[in-house]
Amino acid sequence: MSDPHLGSGSSANPNLVLTLVYFLTIAAILIGTAVYFIVMARITDPEVRLMELITTQREVQHLIDNLSSQFSNFWRLPLRWRSMKPYYTHQTLSWIFILALVASVVVLIVALALDLAQVARISTLTYVVSLNALFMVRQHLYYIRRTYLTYDAEHYLVLDTTKFYYFDWSVFNVVQLGILVIEFLQLLSFPIRDLLDALYLSKNQQLNGNSDGSNTASFIIGIITMFANLSSKFYVIQFWFLVSVIGCIVLVMTVIHTYNAMRPHRPIAIYWVKYLLPLANLLYLPMLVMLIGSAACLSKIGTEDASDSSSGLLRCDSPSVVKPLYLALTVVAYTAGYVILTAFVTSFDRIPIKGEIHYKSQGVAFLKNMSMLLSIDFLLVANSYRHIRSILSLVIVLSMVCFNINTQPCFVEQINYWRTYGFCCILWVALIVTMLTNEDSTLSDTGTGGIVSALAVVYYNDVIKAMVNTYLVNAE
């Protein structure tokens, strides 16, 4: 029996190709990273290598201190109103989101036990949004109080005043540029997918029954962004792979922390943690979006969106997939993966050398969290609310543009400029999707509305240019 997600004339299984590309890419990144550092260790002068190790160990220790401070700030929630002073807003919002988390977990358990598909879907969305909102609030409070939580206040004063106008073409910077390009394509893929869904769910497709173009476009997007659109049997493989990876991360962190706490005089060396940061930044969205896609697909089983061929980034319609088990594991894995990865990539606050592409941790925290909210918006919000989903994406991306212009999270001015321009491109595409989709008709039914939308987009393009020009004048 042929896979219903394949085109009629397909000679190769796109899901198999995409799965191989996905795992081979991860393997190539891991092997390439290991080979690079092994080669550099052999060709570098021993004295220089020793100084680099000492510097790296100091930087990693600072990272661990920041990570510990973040977790400490995350869990310490005052119960009394007087104890919340002067951060009443942060503490109140934190308790609201915690109550929402607890309520959504209880409702989700009941919904899975009674097989209430729609209730399970809403509770899953509520849980994920509440978790992200809670972590964002606690991180914002951490950055406000950071001077008092850490021992090195002067370090952060230097970070706030450091700025470069140009970057050099070192290997590290080339890797950072590559990560920036991939992140841009990953974020851009969300509104593009929504636009393609609107195109190929039109009346013409329903009459012709042909979705080859949509499958081809989704396949290409999956290859470029590492967001795999898999059939059921490959979904199971990738699901257990991701759960295993996150479980191993939690286990390694627990073992190292316990061992170093029990034997502080002979701790495990952790200088190698620094070299995992580029890898964590690169795989941050693919790993977490796969889990969000899993939750989206599982929560849509038994609802109206289950019949939609693009109901999620992952397919989960196999009889071997037990919905309660897989959805519970997805929620647990996402919770652990999101909290650990987000805290990890936002804890590296070292002073960069001149010409190095590096970011302020608060900027990384905001943009990573906004990226996750964008993925949650496109994957967990029902297709019947596509118009509202598009408007929410517009608000999210607009906030990313404004934040990047206002705070300039990168120490290199050129990167801030090009990143702002990239966010504006995503905003432009999100605006098109917002205008050309609505809840009651598909893209082919918009008629003259499409012409009006195109004129509005032309006008908005001038607005984007004005924003970028203003940014450049301020930078000078």
Image (cartoon, rainbow, N blue to C red):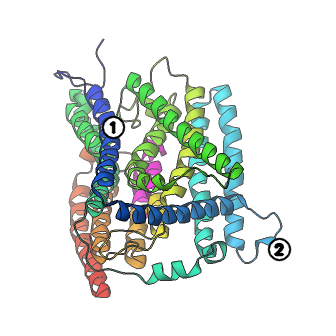
Comparing 217 with 172, the one in front is 172
The location of residue 154, given as percent across then percent down, is: 55, 82
> Which residue is at a point 48% across and 67% down the rendered structure image?
361
For badge 1, the amino acid type reads Ala
Q: Is residue 196 above or below residue 274?
A: above
Comparing 113 with 415, the one in front is 415
Query: Which residues are the magenta region?
Result: 371-395
> Which residue is at a point 37% across and 72% down the rendered structure image?
410
Q: Is residue 115 above or below residue 100?
A: above
**Structural distance between the alpha carbons of marks 2 and 1:** 52 Å
The residue that label 2 is drawn on is 82
Mark in the foreground, 2 or 1: 1
The location of residue 91, given as percent across then percent down, is: 71, 67
For badge 2, the amino acid type reads Arg
The residue that label 1 is drawn on is 27
Q: Is residue 184 above or below residue 211?
A: below
Q: Is residue 22 above or below residue 136?
A: above
* Count of numbered circles in the view: 2
Evaluate whether residue 384 shows in this view.
Answer: no
The location of residue 432, given as percent across then percent down, is: 28, 58
Q: Quadrant of the N terminus?
A: top left
